[in-house]
């Protein structure tokens, strides 16, 4: 038995490590380490509820939009406020812009080097982190999407226009034309067509050609670069080539875990219908989601033993006291559980939920997971990566349709009056790019009396709980091949398939007073 520690794990947001035991060339035991303490919930206690979205969006500099929007949902839920349809549409556009921006960041910057030609001689020259043309093009596209976010949100990061009761932006023809122009340009690069033909339709038309072209170049040992045909989206070509290389490397047989998955759903319209549905897949059937089933365990977390609760909404944040050095503890992350079991969150659970509700032509576009990753509901490294790419296609189409709807709301009210309740509780639940995000608030005497946040990565990177159930990442790492202890690339590939964001999971660290943090 040999111990392998990777700390920090690079190319993810925040500070993460893993402590593994390796025997017979495979991981046999895994501990996921979140190495810093988060205190944002403590910061907002005693403050005006309207401060919460402003402060809590700074939990993360990447998914800042998501924390602001879900915090707004929580305090509006507590106050019984329903925002106008025009304001809801703007919020959904902000959310989908965030997703369309974020997934390529994962592909090109965070996981791309795991498969690039410069390191691994795969032919994927466009993913080379220093010289890759695909990386440079993606950065240019992402900058354009940030411009769109700034037009609608006031600035980026940490947008300003979404506020309690709606959005402080007036919809007019100028803002519509700017947004549509940017999205059309990015779509042409990503997919090969502009407004008018859906990303799914065009992908279905040209996917076969791309697969044949990439396969022939891989077999011939040539650099995998797209042809100069403008209808072959350069982004799409890159992502198809990435999937094929992942499949050739055997990722279907890595990062496997029981397919227990959770999705909160998001992109809700004015009638309450959500584009991505909520639900819990228990490994055999898809169940209705009930947030009252969410609890947190701290058996192996650096907190006093009563910092967890039977239901997260009933937890008292004041009890969240650090206990660094607690016997058996090894992480600052808590262990969220649904019905007492660890649930994976992220693009794969969202796509599985959509498949059960809307059919697998949307839940597994082009049958990629069915044909390449062991099944539509299989949970492994390849399935997670494919689902993220499939979701990008759906969200490009959703974003385009939402922008076209803006013309119907020119000049309409985008906000409504918001009154702070004297005493109330509220919950905000939605999806961030990396998975299910929840905020819980309790208001007393018009001030925040309690606040809880469970970020997506807290689910995925959670430690083993008091019943011996490993967290999703820990479970997925068991059995991962380790051929070279000095370069355990397969371990890194499994970790990156979850696209972790430890910035959202843990935050504050005092090197002199690690066990005595006061906030």
Image (cartoon, rainbow, N blue to C red):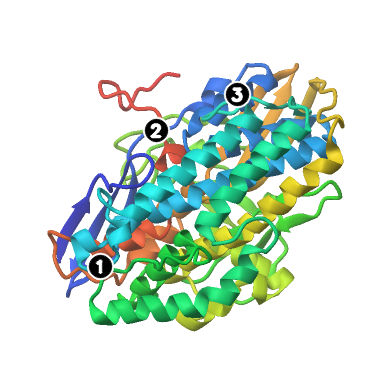
Residue 248 shows which numbered tag?
Answer: none
* Residue 236 spot, x, y in % from top left: 48, 64
Question: Gap between marks 2 and 1, in whole Å?
Answer: 27 Å
Q: Name the residue under label 1.
A: 27
Q: Nearer the viewer, residue 466 or 378?
A: 378
Q: In the structure shown, which secondary structural element does the residue marked by tag 1 occupy?
A: strand
Quadrant assignment for the N terminus: bottom left
Residue at image position (49%, 67%) is 232
Question: In the shown orientation, is residue 114 left or right of residue 140?
Answer: left
- Tell which of 14 and 110 is nearer to you: 110
Vertical side of 220 occupied by 279: above or below: above
Numbered badge on residue 54: 3
Q: In which quarter of the image is residue 475?
A: bottom left
Do the residues under discs 2 and 3 have CB atoms within 8 angstroms?
A: no
Disc 3 versus disc 1: nearer the observer: 3
Which quadrant would the C terminus be assigned to in this image? top left
- Local crowd at mark 2 within 10 Å, few (<14), some, or many (≥20)? many
Residue sitting at 73 percent across and 69 percent down?
357
The image quadrant of residue 514 is: top left
Q: Residue at x 54, y 62 (%)?
A: 192
Q: Where is residue 128, by image quadrant?
A: bottom left
What crowding class fits label 1: few (fewer than 14 Cα within 10 Å), some (14-19), or many (20 or more)?
A: many
- In the image, which is nearer the foreground, mark 2 or mark 3? 3
Residue closest to the eye, 37 or 349: 349
Q: How crowded is mark 3: few (under 14 residues within 10 Å), some or many (20 or more)?
A: many
Q: Which mark is residue 37?
A: 2
Give the mark nearest the N terminus, 2 or 3. Answer: 2
* Residue 441 percent across, percent down from the top left: 67, 32
Q: Identify the element where label 2 is drawn.
A: loop
Q: What residue do we see at 59% from left, 75% from top?
A: 204
């Amino acid at each position: 038995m040999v111990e392998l520690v990777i700390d920090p794990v690079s190319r993810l947001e925040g500070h993460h490590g893993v402590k593994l035991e390796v025997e017979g060339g495979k991981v046999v035991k895994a501990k996921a380490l979140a190495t810093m303490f988060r205190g944002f919930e403590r910061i907002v206690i005693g403050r005006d509820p309207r401060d919460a979205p402003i402060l809590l969006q700074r939990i993360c500099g990447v998914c800042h939009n998501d924390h602001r929007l879900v915090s707004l949902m929580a305090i509006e839920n507590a106050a019984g406020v329903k925002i106008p349809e025009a304001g809801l549409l703007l919020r959904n556009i902000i959310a989908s812009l965030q997703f369309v921006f974020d997934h390529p960041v994962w592909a090109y910057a965070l996981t791309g080097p795991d498969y690039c030609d410069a390191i691994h001689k795969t032919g994927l020259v466009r993913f080379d982190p220093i010289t890759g043309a695909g990386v440079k093009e993606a950065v240019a596209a992402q900058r354009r999407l940030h411009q769109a976010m700034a037009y609608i949100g006031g600035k980026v990061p940490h947008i300003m226009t979404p506020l309690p009761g709606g959005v402080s932006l007036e919809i007019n023809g100028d803002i519509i034309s700017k947004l549509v122009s940017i999205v059309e340009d990015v779509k042409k690069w990503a997919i090969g067509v502009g407004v008018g033909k859906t990303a799914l339709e065009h992908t279905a038309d040209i996917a076969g050609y791309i697969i044949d072209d990439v396969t022939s170049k891989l077999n011939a040992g040539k650099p995998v670069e797209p042809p100069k045909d403008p209808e072959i989206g350069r982004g799409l070509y890159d992502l198809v080539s990435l999937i094929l290389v992942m499949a050739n490397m055997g990722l279907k047989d890595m990062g496997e875990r029981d397919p227990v998955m959770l999705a909160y759903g998001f992109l809700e319209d004015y009638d309450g219908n959500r584009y991505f549905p909520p639900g819990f897949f228990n490994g055999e059937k898809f169940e209705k989601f009930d947030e009252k089933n969410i609890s947190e365990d701290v058996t192996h977390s650096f907190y006093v033993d009563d910092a967890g609760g039977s239901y997260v909404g009933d937890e008292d944040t004041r009890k969240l006291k650090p206990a660094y050095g607690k016997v058996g503890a090894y992480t600052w992350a808590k262990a969220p559980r649904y019905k007492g079991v660890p649930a994976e969150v992220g693009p794969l659970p969202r796509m599985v939920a959509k498949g059960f509700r809307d059919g697998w032509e949307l839940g597994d576009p082009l049958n990629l997971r069915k044909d390449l990753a062991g099944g539509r509901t299989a949970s492994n490294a390849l399935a997670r990566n494919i689902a993220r790419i499939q979701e990008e296609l759906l969200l490009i189409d959703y974003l385009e349709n939402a922008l076209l709807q803006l013309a119907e709301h020119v000049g309409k009210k985008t906000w409504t009056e918001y009154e702070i309740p004297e005493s109330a509780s509220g919950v905000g639940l939605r999806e961030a790019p990396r998975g299910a995000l929840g905020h819980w608030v309790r208001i007393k005497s018009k001030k925040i009396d309690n606040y809880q946040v469970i970020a997506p990565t807290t689910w995925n990177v959670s430690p083993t709980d008091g019943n011996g159930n490993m967290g999703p990442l820990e479970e997925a790492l068991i059995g991962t091949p380790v051929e070279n202890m000095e370069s355990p690339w397969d371990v890194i590939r499994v970790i990156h398939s979850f696209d972790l964001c430890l910035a959202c999971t843990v935050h504050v660290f005092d090197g002199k007073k690690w066990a005595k943090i006061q906030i």
